[in-house]
Image: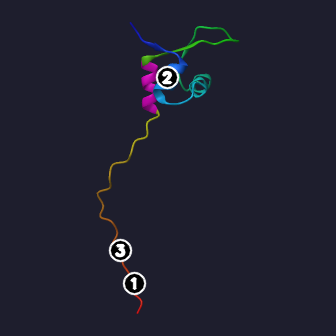
C-alpha cells in the first residue's frame, strides 16, 4: 500500500506553510495528483514523490579543501 500526503501534512513535516507546498505543486516542482476539480483542487502527493522532492532541495556542503591555508603575514610598524 502506497502512502499519500496532503499539502498541510507535508507543510507540517517540512516546517513551511501549506500555501508554499501548494505553490510547489502548481508550479510543477512537486508532483501531485488532483482528486478535486479546477475550482477546488484536492492534491495528494505520494511518499516517493515527496522524498525525491525533499532530497533534491537539500543543500550539500562541499568537501573540505586539502590545501594548506595561505600564510598570513603581519606587518609591524615601529
Q: In the rendered structure, which disc, 2 or 3, sits on the residue that comes first in sequence?
A: 2
The N terminus, quarter of image: top left
Principal SS element in the magenta part? Answer: helix
Q: Is residue 7 left or right of residue 49?
A: right
The residue positioned 62% from the left and 22% from the top of the image is 26
Residue designated by label 1: 75
Residue designated by label 3: 72
User: With respect to residue 45, does 60 lie above or below?
Assistant: below
Residue designated by label 2: 10
**Can residue 52 be found in the magenta stretch?**
yes
Kindly indicate whether the residue at mark 2 contacts the one at mark 1 (C-beta within 8 angstroms).
no
Q: Position of residue 27 (x, y in %)?
A: 61, 26
Highlighted magenta segment, given as a residue range: 48-56
Q: Position of residue 67 (x, y in %)?
A: 30, 61
Kindly indicate whether the residue at mark 1 contacts the one at mark 3 (C-beta within 8 angstroms).
no
The residue positioned 33% from the left and 72% from the top of the image is 71
Amino acid at each position: 500500500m502506497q502512502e499519500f500526503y496532503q499539502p498541510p501534512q507535508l507543510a507540517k513535516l517540512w516546517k513551511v506553510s501549506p500555501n508554499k507546498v501548494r505553490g510547489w505543486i502548481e508550479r510543477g516542482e512537486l508532483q501531485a495528483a488532483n482528486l478535486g476539480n479546477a475550482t477546488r483542487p484536492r492534491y495528494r502527493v505520494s511518499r516517493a514523490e515527496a522524498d525525491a522532492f525533499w532530497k533534491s532541495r537539500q543543500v550539500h556542503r562541499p568537501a573540505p579543501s586539502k590545501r594548506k591555508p595561505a600564510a598570513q603575514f603581519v606587518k609591524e610598524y615601529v
